[in-house]
Amino acid sequence: MSDSSETTCEDSYVGPHTSRRGFLLRARNLLNVLLLSAFPLPIVGDLLAPLRRKAFLKWVSLGPASAFPENQTRLAVYKNPFRQPTDGVTADIPCWVRRLTGDSFQVFSDNCSHLGCPVRWFPQSELFMCPCHGGTFHADGSRGSGPPPRGLYVYPFKVESGELWINAGEMPLMTLPRP
Amino acid sequence: MARLRSWLLAIGQWFGLRLRRPEYGNGFRRPRSSISWAYVFGSGAFVLLLVEFVTGVCLALVYSPSAETAWQSLLNLNYQVPFGWYLRALHFWGSNFLIILLIFHLIQVFVLGSYKYPRELTWIIGVLLLLLTLGMALSGEVLRFDQESYWDLVIGFTLAGRAPLIGPFLVHFLMGGPIIAGATLMRMYLMHVLLVPAAIVVLTALHLLLVYRLGISEWPMPGRVVRRETYLTNYRTVLDREGEPLIPNGLRKDMIFAMLTVVALIVTAAIMGPKGPNGPPNPSIIRTRPHPDFFFLWVEALMGLLPSWLDTPFGLVVLPILVVGLIALPLISPVGERAILRRPLSLVVATVMVTVLIVTTWLGTYDPWSQEMDAWSGTPTPVEYLKGRTPLEIQGAILIQAKQCRNCHSLGGAGGMRGPALDTTATRLTRNELIRQILQGGGNMPAYGKALKPAEVAAIVAFLATMHPPNEPPAHNSAQPAIPPATGG
């Protein structure tokens, strides 16, 4: 006891004989480090939550397939399946629905494949035209002219009991694979 | 280890030299040659920054950063809140003025060579401040949560999404989800009112501290070379011989300029009013034309004018290199001549950059690379092009309207400018070439082969073949002369 009272606090950290006090101090420090490193984890997790690349895709109904006449291309609007209560009108996502014959559809994103501007369908010239940098697309969504590097993004679709469904929810980016 | 320590020591000394206590004797003084109209932009920008902070705080009292209500709260500001419209106008035009003054300030410091030793750090912080201010402009544009800002976000994210590997992750992180929505606005709001302003306050304080500690650079003289060993001593001699106290003489021109700037801002804001908001940020309203605010028009112009395979390399390689080069400029040339005429390379590079910026911004104001989406239905064919035409030719003129040709091609100066004007088409292309161009497209024109019946093509070509001035013959295939030889002449 008399020996340990003479050693200073610092001595107790090092050396072959660790005192009880030294051990407890070390344990406390370890605990502090653990706590301090655990504390920001939820913050980092919250910030990086959007990075978790689960597929943001859900089947959304575009209404009865009969609403789309054959051999025509019509604008359809669906609600973003991942919308939050405060999203307001930003949850109204448009897409172009082209019905060929019967249950054969093509559903295009309205985002130009160049920089994402909203393309507009012109039935007279059978072209999608982009208002930004002069890109055009043919009726089947393939690239017509201008800077777009490829055709329009095509949503996967299915027709179930007379209703047209598309697999949507994510902003179609250039880098996403084209289904 | 010793080497690391010596490096750290050197870095510490580099900063220490620049942030040391000044040795000016009685009060802060500046060289008399620096009291010039060329030196007033920095202080002018500082005054505008204060205006932005004050108006910004006032706007934040009313603005509602929710995707559901942001747009309505802007209308509320415009029409209900007393002087709300004027605060918005001051804030918007103030940001425009601020960016212009910052660019002038940058050019001034570059041309006068003031960024050289010992003021390297001042320049670096200044460029960071310019970038942060551009970030404020961008996020502020998003807070004006209307159609335009929605689509500007789409464009920005689409471009960012092209970054290799990290692209989609980066975009999801910035959007706060899989698609632009309420979370995106919240993130931009946080950047605009908290994170970036905090950084701007800290860096502006550092910038001013450095100006105070290192003094204001004297007017450059050809032949007076900046050397690390002698500059500080020389500068002190200049101060001793012709130093002016900051108050009253040293700040006189700065005060006058700042006052004129604020007066110009007050008048501009009162006359021009606030910008927008235009339509609500509803992506399903597709009748829209995205346009960035003027400080990013040059990006839009380059995106429209560069060949498409150069878009991504420009945005992700060239632009970052230019920005890093701008930041690192004083580390690349810390000493030497300051007078611009003794720095020919700097002069050429600066002139080219400024010219490109001005020209592309100017082009961006009327974007000739865009289609005019309503020209086909809203811009009639000039009457003189229809006088004395055959029914077939008139049918062609009608088809040129109905098939949206006018969206890209102008007639009589009206219509899109994406493609060539059609007024003199017949002098450039023969009938066969016209047919080929219409059916197969090419250049920037889509192929119309599937959208036109042969009879329609014949009518359009018949009309276009009349598109030549009376005194200039139409183009013809020189292998088969189609024009009968002139008689009697």
Image (spheres, coloured by chain):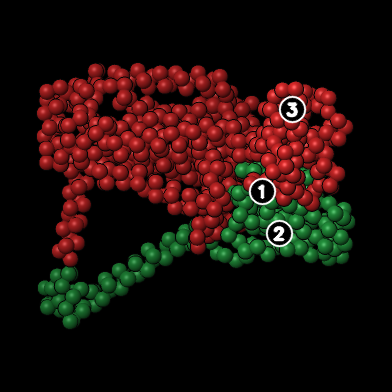
Chain colours: A green, B red
CA distance for labels 3 and 2? 58 Å
For badge 2, the amino acid type reads Val
For the N terminus of chain B, give its image quadrant: bottom left
Q: Nearer the viewer, mark 3 or mark 1?
A: 3
Q: Does dot 2 land on a helix, a strand or a loop?
A: strand
* Front one among A124 and B79: A124
| Residue A36 at x, y percent in the picture | 37, 63
For badge 3, the amino acid type reads Ala
In the displayed structure, does residue A93 sit left or right of residue A12?
A: right
Q: Are marks 3 and 1 on the same chain?
A: yes
Residue at image coords 77%, 50%: B449
| Chain under numbered label 1 | B
Can you identify the residue that label 3 sits on? B486
Q: Which mark is residue B306?
A: none
Q: Mark 1 near mark 2, Cβ–Cβ under 8 Å?
A: no
Can you identify the residue that label 2 sits on? A154
Q: Residue B386's image quarter?
A: top right
For badge 1, the amino acid type reads Gly
Q: Which mark is residue B442?
A: 1
Q: Does dot 1 land on a helix, a strand or a loop?
A: loop
* Front one among B290 and B194: B290
